[in-house]
Amino acid sequence: FWSDHGYFLGEKGLWYKRKAFERSARMPLIIAAPGLRQGKHTSKPVELLDLYPTLADLCGLKPPANLEGQSLRPLLTDPAGKDWTKPAVTQVWHNKKSWGYSIRNERYRYTEWLEGKAGRELYDHSTDPNEVTNLADIPQHAKTVAELSTQLKPFVRLKPHKR
């Protein structure tokens, strides 16, 4: 079972979708299949593009090599995900000119608008799950911002000026 993410209904003063906040990007995902333990939960972020490779894997099929997603079977068998390091990436469009790309790992969400030229956001979900305090411009978080920005770059494909 999976669902679409919802609309903002006044949270953060917003009333629609297309935002790179957790409340807009996160959605429920429940997977049940023969041989999987029931009632387990993981805090690791995943993406919907991981569903096709997961379903193929659970059916014993080899997914096409050109898929960007990867099977969630490792998380289904070990919800602690000791070896799962894949982040979740969100792409959003805003005001007909700003593209936002967000990368989410287990601890942080980092977002760049227009590749950082129109702003950056960093939220620490271990201390700020509601994404209230933007840490991107605080000097002690510069290393984290640099690391996440580097991780995000391969996912930034469609540039606003090429639309």
Image (tube, grey):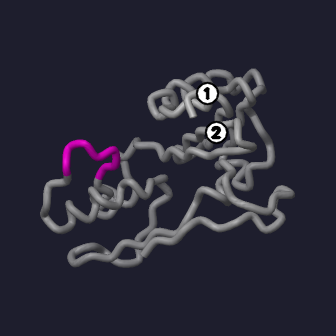
Q: Label 1: how many residues lie within 10 Å, few (<14), some (14-19) or many (20+)?
A: few
Label number found at residue 139? none
**Earlier along the polypeptide chain: callout 2 or callout 1?**
2
Left or right, 34 with reference to 7: left
Q: Name the residue located 67 percent from the left edge and 43 percent from the top edge.
A: 124
What is the quadrant of residue 112 in the picture? Answer: top right
What is the quadrant of residue 144 in the picture? Answer: top right
- The type of residue carrying mark 1 is His
Q: Where is the N terminus found, in terms of image quarters? A: bottom left
- The type of residue carrying mark 2 is Gly
- Asked whether 109 or 64 is in front, the reply is 64
Which residue is disc 2 drawn over? 100
Q: Label 2: how many residues lie within 10 Å, few (<14), some (14-19) or many (20+)?
A: many
Considering the numbered disc 1 on the image, is that residue within a helix, a strand or a loop?
helix
Give the magenta part as a residue range: 64-70
Which residue is disc 1 drawn over? 161
Left or right, 37 with reference to 100: left
> How far across and how far down the image is residue 55, in percent?
26, 65
> How far across and how far down the image is residue 120, in percent?
71, 32
Q: Where is the C terminus found, in terms of image quarters? A: top right
27 over 19 or under it: above or below: below
Considering the numbered disc 2 on the image, is that residue within a helix, a strand or a loop?
strand
> How far across and how far down the image is residue 5, in percent?
59, 65
Mark 2 vs mark 1: in front: 1
- Asked whether 39 or 18 is in front, the reply is 18
Q: Name the residue located 34 percent from the left edge and 49 percent from the top edge.
A: 69
Task: Examine the structure image and report whether residue 20 is included in the region drawn in magenta.
Answer: no
> How far across and how far down the image is residue 105, in percent?
52, 44
Q: Name the residue located 30 percent from the left edge and 60 percent from the top edge.
A: 52
Task: Name the main secondary structure of what is drawn in magenta.
Answer: loop
